[in-house]
Amino acid sequence: MSRPLFIAMDGPKGTGKTTLLEALTQALRARGNKVVRLCERNNDPQRAQTMALVNQLARQPSPTVEWQVCERLAESRAWITRHVLPRQPGDSIVLIDRWYPSDAAFRRNVPFDQVLRLNIERGVQVPDLHIAVLTTAQTSWTRAASRRRGLGSTVIHTLEEQMASTQAFNHAAHEHGWLLCQNEGTVADAVDQLVEAVTPLLHA
């Protein structure tokens, strides 16, 4: 491989993205692959300013501020694209926990496709493999509610909003050809599906 294989794991809140990412990392490393784990929030040089805007949106929801949040996050991803991704080993698999499709799923007022377009226009790197992690809205809502931090969202506050987010993400996954991982069985079953999808890309 002359460059890293870049894989993003995305989906609505509470679908089990982080748990799957950890299990997939272990499975790929057990097969002798070099895996680099990245998290957007840990590589955002303007994270404090970004979160200040996110908190402003939580206090005073408005389409204008929500669009500003989308712009700020897209700029951060573009910076990561230029300064972080090129530094990763060329023979590695780079797994990132949430990329721009997750941001699109969390929005209340900005259309899903508009967030995708914004990121592409800003030069954000398109993953070699988009993994769309989905469950029913009720399942993800229940999972999130059982966590100590709850849903942990400044945007999604009700089951109805979670249902709309899930429906939009499911539609986008099919429309854009993302790898759909219906994460309602065991973690082992989901990881087997993902490893089977990743393996051919390593030899491409």
Image (cartoon, helix red, strand yellow):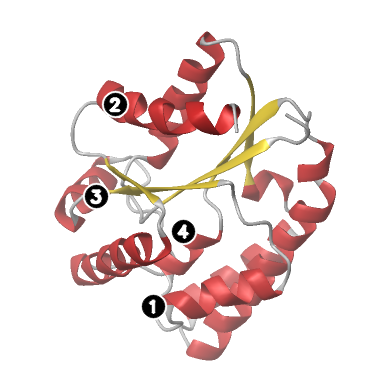
Residue at the disc numbered 1: 108
Q: Which residue is drawn at 53% across and 71% down?
A: 116
Picture coordinates of residue 75, whole percent (x, y) = 73, 68
The image shows residue 109, relative to residue 172, as above or below, that is: below
Counting residues from the start of the chain, the first of labels 3 and 4 encountered is 4
Q: Which residue is drawn at 71% across and 35% down?
A: 4
Task: Report whether residue 183 is seen.
Answer: yes
| Rendered-image quadrant of the C terminus | top right
Counting residues from the start of the chain, the first of labels 2 and 1 encountered is 1
The nearer-to-camera label among 3 and 4 is: 4
Mark 1 vs 3: CB contact within 8 A:
no
Residue at the disc numbered 4: 102
Counting residues from the start of the chain, the first of labels 1 and 4 encountered is 4
Residue at the disc numbered 2: 187
| Rendered-image quadrant of the N terminus | top right
The nearer-to-camera label among 1 and 4 is: 4
- The amino acid on which the numbered mark 1 sits, given as a three-letter code, is Arg
Q: Which residue is drawn at 76% across and 44% down?
A: 85
SS assignment at label 4: helix
Counting residues from the start of the chain, the first of labels 1 and 3 encountered is 1
Residue at the disc numbered 3: 140
